Image (cartoon, helix red, strand yellow):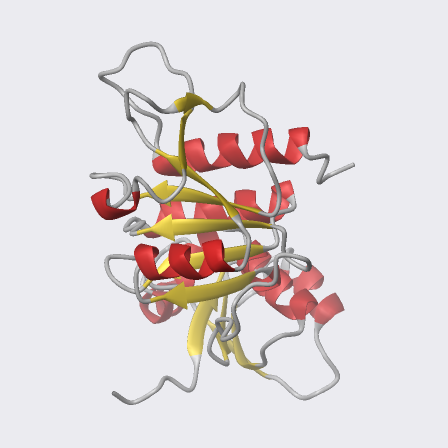
Amino acid sequence: MKQKTVEIVYGVHPILELLKAKKRKITTLYVLQPEPKTFKQIKACLPVYPIKINYKSRQELTQLSGTPDHQGIVALASPFQTRKKTFDPKLQPFIILLDGIQDPRNLGAILRSTYCTGFQGVILTQKGTAPLNAVVLKAAAGLAEHLEIAVAPSAGAALQQLKQDGYHIYISALEKNAHDATKIIYEKPLCLVIGSEGTGVSKDILNKGQTVIVPQRTSDISYNASVAAGILMFLVAHQCKILS
């Protein structure tokens, strides 16, 4: 399979955060003519190396990005680079494992919460996970650019390595014996595990850590995956004083 040399990024915040993170290079900017007022923010962050700027109509930008949600600016950038090394419990004591999050907007929302709560790393699974594309980056408001993101062959393989490295595992699951997430003491270094929107975490990993549940009104409903992830990360961040 031929590796991509450029990726599309659209929207003001995704492009701003891409520039601030300084992890990858923008080759071309496509901007609405006349320039939107928000383009001033982009201009203020442009690097010293030359970037080609092309002015386009709104229809042309929509066609290029595949969505009308581009906010008048589209970029071509070098591909998003995922982490190759395993996480270090001393350097990244708070990470989250996403087991098959399929909706790109859910994935983006979780990545946004990951950054906001101070978690240092994310592990995605190869199978059944939405790709890290422009939709995900837009939903994350560009904050994924600042995260360390790794991709594992499976949740089971990732958890085996994490446990060997000394991480405590907390698995979000609608299980009868799951512990109330608001009442347990979280031990660090730790990894939170969030399952897919439809089926939750893979059945073969339920016994790989402590199952936790966010309290809800009745057992026949459940939180959206990104909402549950945000609540759990906030609980950990608050208890472990990550943000203080």
- Frontmost residue, 105 versus 162: 162
Q: For the view shown, which residue lies furthest in the top direction?
A: 217
x then y, percent, for residue 183: 54, 18
Identified at 71% across, 40% down, the residue is: 242
Quick one: quadrant of the N terminus? Answer: bottom left
In the figure, residue 15 lies in which quadrant? bottom right
In the figure, residue 151 lies in which quadrant? bottom left
Is residue 135 in view from this perspective? Answer: no
x then y, percent, for residue 43: 70, 69
- Going by the image, does 223 lie left or right of 198? right
Is residue 173 in view from this perspective? Answer: yes
- Frontmost residue, 192 versus 216: 192
Identified at 38% across, 42% down, the residue is: 194
All told, the count of numbered labels is: 0
Residue 215 against residue 171 in the figure, above or below = above
x then y, percent, for residue 241: 73, 35
- Going by the image, does 34 lie left or right of 99? right
x then y, percent, for residue 112: 53, 47
- Frontmost residue, 58 versus 170: 170
Residue 213 against residue 219 in the figure, above or below = below
Residue 101 against residue 218 in the figure, above or below = below
- Frontmost residue, 76 versus 221: 221
Identified at 78% across, 36% down, the residue is: 244
